[in-house]
Each structure stands twice: as structure tokens, then as C-alpha cells.
Image (spheres, rainbow, N blue to C red):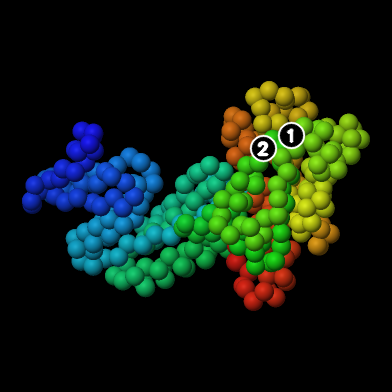
Amino acid sequence: MPRNNRKQALGPGQGHGRLLPNDIGTAPGLLFTVGGKAVICLPGVPREMQLMMERSVEPYLRAEISRREGGVVILSRTLRTIGIGESALEERILDMAHGHDNPTVATYAGSGECEVRITARAAGGDEARSMIHQVASEVRRRLGAMVYGEDDDTLEAVTGQLLMRAGATLATAESCTGGLVAAAITSVSGSSGYFERGYITYSNQAKQQDLGVSPDAIRLHGAVSRQVAIAMAAGAARRSGASIGVSVTGVAGPTGGTPDKPVGTVHLALWDAVHCSVVSARMKFGGDRLSVRQRSTKLCTDMVRRHVGLHWAEEIALSGEQTHPDA
């Protein structure tokens, strides 16, 4: 056995601390106190560390807080938003985020998303949850459809749930994202119930052959244009038989930009074959190639979420499900 693995079998002496189990790895965690302060050591592998935090560290911290503060309960809820930057988000809830210490409201920026974290302290869990609910309801009222979920919700999963409940199917047509939208949608277990297929049509020839995009549309407007994005989305829906086709075409960079279409220019479109509707958007993203592709993927997925939540509400209602209040 390698020395590094043998070392992982060692633990503190009796009364000096305890090991934290690692259910999916070999390196255990360690918890001990120094000068009345808790010291917690965890392995650096993200998946292992996250699971140990959930199963061992968080319960320990909650118990310690309750013991030291006479049974006070501290609960948090995270509202997940998309389509708004952190500064604009904070402006909308400025009066809630500042000057209040219970519940507290804080904003955090992520990759193409922002979070609103609400934390309450109370004598019991029900009271804390009630306090959080009141604030969360007001945040939702102010932000509307920009709130897509809570806590562990992901944009892909929420979008998939709406598609499933509506009985709708989806096909993707991608150029600059190279399949990232399809990968995001299919990262959710059960996505075969609503995802039909994905087309990666990077070249102009592929757009014409696989999606039926008119050569004249590309010649007159360019591959990165509203007209071509709509034609790609329509082609994806028609050729796959999906209810909805969604597309993205853009200049991810760092090369390929022009004065009219600089790097970061992205066109997205959605074609709804059932409701005979079209949605399109032109964006200008900053950042490097990876950032442009990731943000385009987020926005494309969110376009589907918003459209299905709004235009397929009747189908969702007939399925016996309630439309998500964020949709």
C-alpha cells in the first residue's frame, strides 16, 4: 500500500478529535478543537468534500449553534435568478438587503446567474421558515420570471420539468456553442422524455443541408443573424418533429468579429410549431470564448423555460400540474 494511503488510515488519539467519514473516497475528514474553536479538515476533491459537508459538517455546525445560542435555529433559502446582473438585482431589492439583520438578504453573482440568499434566526424551524417565506414572496414579486428556482434547483432541470409537464419535445440547432445547449438539457436524468435531438451545424453548408437554411438567407444576412437563427430553429423543429426548436449562432471569438458583428455577438431563436410562434434575441456578451459560449447556453436554455412556462400553461394545467410560480 502506498505511504499516502497508509497515512489516511491514521486518526487523532482518543479525546483529541474525531474522524469524519468519507463515503465515496479513501481520505477521511478530521474535526478537533483548539482553544475553544472548531477546526475541520476535509479532502480537496470537490465531490467528496461536498458530500462530507452535507452529511457531517453541516449537522455538526447546526447542533453547535443550537447548543451555544440556547436553541436558536438558523435557516437559509437561496432564490436562483437569471437574466439580471448582480448590481441591477441589488437595486431592485436594495431596501431588503440593507438595514435588516433578521432575516438577512444578500446577493451573490455566479456564472451567468445570480443568487438571493435569505437567512432567518428564530426560536424554532417553523418560525424561521415563515420569516423566510414572507421575504422570498416579496423578492419573487419584484423579480418575476427572473427567479427560476430555489436552493439546489438547476436551470436545466427546471426547464426540463416544464417541458415534461407540458408534453412538449425539444430539438436544438447550434453553431457557436457546438452542442453545449444539448449537453445542458441532457445532463438531467429523464431528459429522454422531452429532448428529441440536437444538430451541431457549425458550417454554412451544414446549416443548409441539415436544417434547410436558405443559401440566400446566409448570403444576404450572414450566418450570425436573426434570419438565420430563426431558420435554424424552424429547421430543427421541422426535421426532428419536435414541438419546439431552439437555436444559437454567434461569434464566440477571439477571431471572426467585424465592426457590424463584433466578438460576443450572438443570435438566439425559438420556433414553436404547436403555437405557431417565434421568439428571437440578439445579445452582445463580453468575456473570452468560453464565457460567450457558456452564457449563450444559459440564455438559450432560459428562453425555452420562459416560453414553455408562458405559452404552454394550458397544457401544463391539463396535465394536472400547477405551473411553477417562476415560469
State the residue position of label 2: 178
Q: How many marks?
A: 2
- Residue at the spot 57% in from the left edge and 43% down from the top edge: 112
Q: Residue furthest left?
A: 14
The reply to whether residue 239 is in sight is yes
Which quadrant holds the N terminus?
Answer: top left
Which quadrant holds the C terminus?
Answer: bottom right
Mark 2: few/some/many CA within 10 Å (<14, 14-19, 20+): some
- Residue 11, label in figure: none
Q: Nearer the viewer, residue 31 or 95?
A: 31
Asked if the residues shown at circle 2 and circle 1 are in contact, with their CB atoms under 8 angstroms apart, the answer is yes
Position of residue 24 measured from the top left corner of the image (x, y, whole percent): 34, 50
The secondary element bearing badge 2 is classed as loop
Q: Is residue 139 left or right of residue 2?
A: right
Q: Nearer the viewer, residue 182 or 282?
A: 182
The secondary element bearing badge 1 is classed as loop
What amino acid is at disc 1? Answer: Tyr
Position of residue 315 measured from the top left corner of the image (x, y, whole percent): 72, 70
State the residue position of label 1: 202
- Residue at the spot 65% in from the left edge and 50% down from the top edge: 301
Position of residue 211 measured from the top left corner of the image (x, y, whole percent): 82, 43
Mark sitting earlier along the chain (2/1): 2
Q: Nearer the viewer, residue 94 or 159?
A: 159
**Placement of 303 over or under 68, stated as above or below:** above
Q: Residue furthest front?
A: 1
Q: Is residue 31 left or right of residue 317?
A: left
What amino acid is at disc 2? Answer: Gly
- Residue at the spot 59% in from the left edge and 29% down from the top edge: 288
Examine the image and state in which quarter residue 265 appears: top right
CA gap, disc 2 and disc 1? 7 Å
Q: Is residue 161 left or right of residue 93?
A: right
